[in-house]
Image (spheres, rainbow, N blue to C red):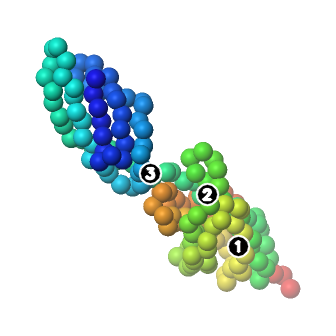
């Protein structure tokens, strides 16, 4: 049997087969932080065939993946608002309740540091030119739990055209 510890943050027992320890039974005594790497101390307990041995490894706690989506008006007349709906979800398809988004029209920032709260976010803006606009969103995590993510370009999913008025 093998014992794995992390400075009293986590403990586990593992089965050793052909020199490889594996476990799916880990007890966490403290919350581990995503984005951090922890040293793991392994201790092989002596038996009739093998002597006591120790070793050190690493456990990396990965940040959780995110998906950011954007949708909005397909076509508007020049001077009208474009209303964008933005949703940020985690790997379990649940809305994320912390962090912020930045919305771009090409290289121009439309909205920055827009706090998300787990609900659908809605942002409106008036494009300053006619034509197809490349609008996209970047999600930023503030607590180090989630990976940042980019939406697909609004103009890829929708026409996103601002039509000049005939009047």
The residue tagged 2 is: 96
Residue 159 appears anywhere in the view: no
Q: What residue is at 56 percent from the left and 66 percent from the top?
A: 99
Of residues 21 and 131, the one nearer the viewer is 21
Q: How far apart are marks 3 and 1 (CA)?
A: 35 Å
Point out residue 94 in the picture as x, y percentages from the top left corner. 64, 50
Q: In this view, does 146 lie to the left or right of 10?
A: right
Q: What residue is at 65 percent from the left and 55 percent from the top?
A: 95
Q: Which of marks 3 and 1 is nearer the N terminus?
A: 3
- Mark 1 vs mark 2, foreground winner is 2
Q: How far apart are marks 1 and 2 (CA)?
A: 17 Å
Point out residue 92 in the picture as x, y percentages from the top left corner. 60, 45
Q: What residue is at 35 percent from the left and 54 percent from the top?
A: 36
Of residues 130 and 61, the one nearer the viewer is 61
Judge whether 48 appears above or below 145 on screen. above
Q: Is residue 158 left or right of residue 67?
A: right
Of residues 64 and 17, the one nearer the viewer is 17
Point out residue 134 in the picture as x, y percentages from the top left corner. 60, 69
Question: Element at badge 2?
Answer: loop
The residue tagged 1 is: 123
The outermost residue toward the bottom is 167
Q: How far apart are marks 2 and 3 (CA)?
A: 19 Å
The residue tagged 3 is: 31
Image quadrant for the C terminus? Answer: bottom right
């Amino acid at each position: 049997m093998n014992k794995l510890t992390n400075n009293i943050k986590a403990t586990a027992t593992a089965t050793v087969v052909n020199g490889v320890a594996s476990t799916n039974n880990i007890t966490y005594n403290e919350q581990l932080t995503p984005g951090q790497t922890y040293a793991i101390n392994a201790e092989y307990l002596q038996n009739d065939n093998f002597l006591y041995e120790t070793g050190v490894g690493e456990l990396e706690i990965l940040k959780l993946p995110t998906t950011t989506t954007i949708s909005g008006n397909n076509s508007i007349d020049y001077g009208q608002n474009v209303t964008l709906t933005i949703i940020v979800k985690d790997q379990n398809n649940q809305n994320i309740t912390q962090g912020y988004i930045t919305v771009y029209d090409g290289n121009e920032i439309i909205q920055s540091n827009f706090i998300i709260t787990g609900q659908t976010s809605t942002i409106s803006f008036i494009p300053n030119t006619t034509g197809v606009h490349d609008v996209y969103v970047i999600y930023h995590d503030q607590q180090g739990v989630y990976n940042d993510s980019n939406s697909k370009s609004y103009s890829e999913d929708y026409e996103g055209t601002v039509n000049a008025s005939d009047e």
